[in-house]
Amino acid sequence: MKTKTSVLTVVLVLMAFIVAIVVLCSTVFCVSSIKVVWHTSTIALTGQDDNMIQKSGLTTGQSVFLVGKDESVQKLESSYPYVKVLGIETVFPSTLNIHLQEREILYVIQISSSSYAFVDQDFKVLEIKNGVYDVNSKKAILLSGDFKLENVTVSQFLFLEKYDAFKTLQLNFERMDFNIVLLKAFIKQASLGNDRIILDTYLGVQIQIFSPEIRQQEKVAMVLKVFDSLDKSNQTKGIIGVFENNENQICGSHYS
């Protein structure tokens, strides 16, 4: 009885192996089409679809089951600083869709006395420029701090753990219908205190968000609520402070 069971197991394994080989070798499941699907508008990457497909290493003719997706993502992200790969989708039987976003400049960091880097909200380096950044250009929010960065290169991700709260800041403003263009025209400079994010605005009022890693979305909503309640003269001076009180309520006040 045991011998028959063993033989049956071997036969089933061989059949499964043969089926797998047939499927992998079948022309039905060979890549015949590779497409780029954009989830944002493009500026820096307009007209680059064909080049990006080539740079990804994805080719027609290979089995859809043997595509090295992780490797392709890495190639695209490193070759194109402004690319954010959302994923590579297999549409059976033979199509690959590369889902992409174009990254946007959000912050600028002075990386040396003679150069600065533009980064997005993920702290990916999109461009490096020589000189000192003009804080009034409104192209990015100047991120102040002691970064101690060395050998920074384009396409590199900067791992600044204590600045993680800045990664969600733009998203939380966007949830309040404050898109990235408006945000960069509103906030001139950002820095990190011991227990707060400090935002200096072009209008003059300073914003301080206490414990920004906790309930940040609600605190950003409170910032804008307080700001909108101020008359124009008060929007140019003083401090808007937002914090969570002892009753777990998000509170905000303007101090002249």
Image (cartoon, rainbow, N blue to C red):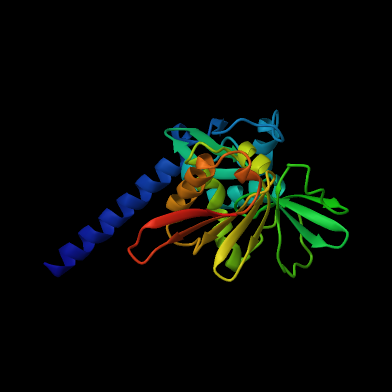
Image position, residue 93 (x, y; %): 43, 33
Judging depth in this view, the residue of 100 and 256 nearest the camera is 256
Between 38 and 26, which is closer to the camera in this rendering?
38
Residue 123 occupies which quadrant of the picture?
A: bottom right
80, above or below 248, in the image: above
Q: How many badges with numbers are in the image?
A: 0
Residue at (59, 48) in percent of width and height: 73
Q: Can you tell which quarter of the image residue 60 is in?
A: top right
Q: Closest to the observer: 129 or 45?
A: 129
- Residue 136 visible, this angle: yes
Question: Which quarter of the figure is the C terminus placed in?
Answer: bottom right
| Place of residue 101 in the rendered image (x, y in percent of width and height, measured from the top left) | 58, 39
Which residue is located at x 46 percent, y 60 percent? 243
Q: Quadrant of residue 239?
A: bottom right
91 with respect to 201 (left or right): left
Compared to residue 148, the image places residue 100 above or below, namely: above
Q: Position of residue 169 (x, y in %)?
A: 55, 51
Q: Residue at x 27, y 60 (%)?
A: 10
Whether residue 50 sits left or right of residue 211 in the image: it is right
Residue 207 locus on image (x, y percent): 59, 54
